[in-house]
Amino acid sequence: MTKTAPAAGFVRRLAGTLHRRPRLQLSLLLTAPLTWLVLAYLGSLSALFLSAFWTTDSFTSSVVKVWNTDNFTTLFESDVYRQVALRSVGVALAVTALCAVIAFPVAFYTARIAKPRWRPLLVVAILTPLWASYLVKAYAWRLILAEGGLLDWLLGPLGLEGPGYGLTATVLVLTYLWLPYMILPIHAGLEQLPDNLLDASADLGARTGRTFRSVVLPMLLPSIAAGSVFTFSLSLGDYIAVQIVGGKTQLIGNLIYSNITLDLPLAAALGTVPVVIIVGYLLAVRRTGALSSL
Amino acid sequence: MNLSRPARITLRIAAGLGFAVIYVPLLLVLVNSLNPDRSSGWPPPGLTFHWWADAWHSTGARDALWTSVKAGLGATAIALVLGTLIAFAVQRFRFFGRETLSFLVVLPIALPGIVTGVALNTAFRTVLEPLGVGLGMFTVVVGHATFCIVVVFNNVVARLRRMAGSYEQAAMDLGATSFRAFVDVTFPLVRSALVAGGLLAFALSFDEIVVTTFTAGPGVQTLPIWIFSNMARPQQAPVVNVVAAVLVLLSVIPIYLAQRLSSDTATGSRI
């Protein structure tokens, strides 16, 4: 008892000091995480983007630290890069649209048609694939789309063939991978949709289709926007799924990857493209108020 | 909305198809691990457990699994500490740059993995290598922790937002020091949020391939890296099939745990 008393007194004094000085508390809380996020993460990120303004000596392939915008000129003037950038944005948009179209009936069923008792279980059923490995899911589609695989076998009797590996396969697989991210916000949005609005719409003489267009869809837009943040930005940065099922398809991620060892400044310049597009997309979506509902 | 009967039936069928599309690939992985044929054509000519025995003895896969677990635990531990610190700062204090900080936390996961990966790779090589720290387990853990912070942060912030600060004040009015109030009052209240956040952080780290590619040295091979590099080798196909099936089966564990936790923290999205 005599031994612990001074220690306890010290702890009490320290606690008192901290309690009277909220600024000190705050700085103790923030020092470690800020060092990590600002110094380590933001620091290396800005270093990377600064290096986009350097060049690579084509002879020794070492980085020359002379300030210039050659990489960005190459980026805008080369047909290949422009094509690949447009293709990547196209893929991301197609995946987002497909996800929304597939997610809607599923979410409508789980949120409004299924018996309330089953709904929590159905939400778990939507969440479950998110816990399965990304690679395993992409690999599963590699098996499905393989020559003589499941899809060929299913379509064979109809005289059709699967798309094989390529751009279509990439869009399909990315849609599959990110679909739950779209179903969940739409499900949440539909669940919160008040019944009396729908009744009011029906009372005013609107048929189902009209109610859907004029009441349901406008109220769901923030949910769809929230889901699209995931489907769009995850698709835009992806380069693994393309390698697994894309055949020879090149997306912007592949270009960055293939330039890293040979020409880091160019890779950094290429890396700014998805970052700028994603930040722009986030800012645009933020105006719909969707981000606060995430 | 008063839907007509045909509309209801159509939606039911569409939802059924949707769920089928979600689950068929996962089931296919399970069945394919029993495929006796090395080529993965459909339908399989028979079923065998032979490859499961083979995979059990595959040292490459086992080492990779162990590496993944270690990296995941390390990253989760760091993310738990840093994410909780930021959550308390953001929720309990008003300070300059508070909004920016919430945005900064999300950034590592919002930006494409390849950008984060390359940035960290360059930084590690210019800063750490002169100090004698090469790319390896340490850099993998640092990279993973950076994007895992956000899931812990989100879970803890959500809990703190709904938790009145009056509990702690009551404890301190009753004579507890702020440390004592934290241990006896605050911590038990945020514990399940920490478990949920930690679970998500581990799952994210365990599944990460892009950032790992750039932060792991040549000697460090996590399970995703192992799968990716063996996927295209016909010789290894049966073992890859089994590992994939095992991962599908293992994903039941976090789902079960998440359900045991309070619904508000666990059923949210992974981000």
Image: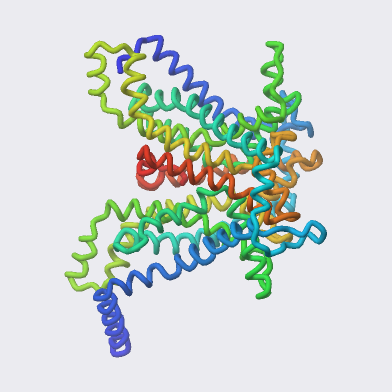
Q: Is residue B231 above or below residue A101?
A: below
Q: Quadrant of residue A64?
A: bottom right
x and y, in percent, of residue B183 in the image: 32, 67
Q: Nearer the viewer, residue A90 or A132?
A: A90
Quadrant assignment, res B217: bottom right
> Residue sitting at 51 percent across and 50 percent down?
B109
Q: Which quarter of the figure is the N terminus of chain B placed in?
A: top left
- A166 shown above or below A271: above
Q: Residue furthest left?
A: B173
x then y, percent, for residue B14:
48, 19
Query: Residue at left 49%, top 64%?
Result: A38
Q: Nearer the viewer, residue A271 or A157?
A: A271
Left or right position of A238 against A146: left
Does the image show residue B215?
no
Count of marks, rendered view: 0
On the question of residue A233 being in view, the answer is: yes
**In-front residue for pair B232/B116:** B116
* Residue A41 x %, y %: 53, 61
> B25 or A102, which lies in front?
A102
Decide: is A264 above or below B261.
below
Locate residue A170: give its quadrant.
top right
Horizontal relation, residue B105 to residue B67: left or right:
left
When the figure is inspected, residue A83 is found, relative to residue B54, above or below; the finding is above
* Image position, residue A269 (x, y; %): 63, 51
Q: Is residue A235 left or right of residue A15?
A: right
- The residue sitting at the bottom extreme is A2
At a point 32% along the width and 64% down the height, the residue shown is: B95
Q: Indicate the colouring scheme.
A: rainbow
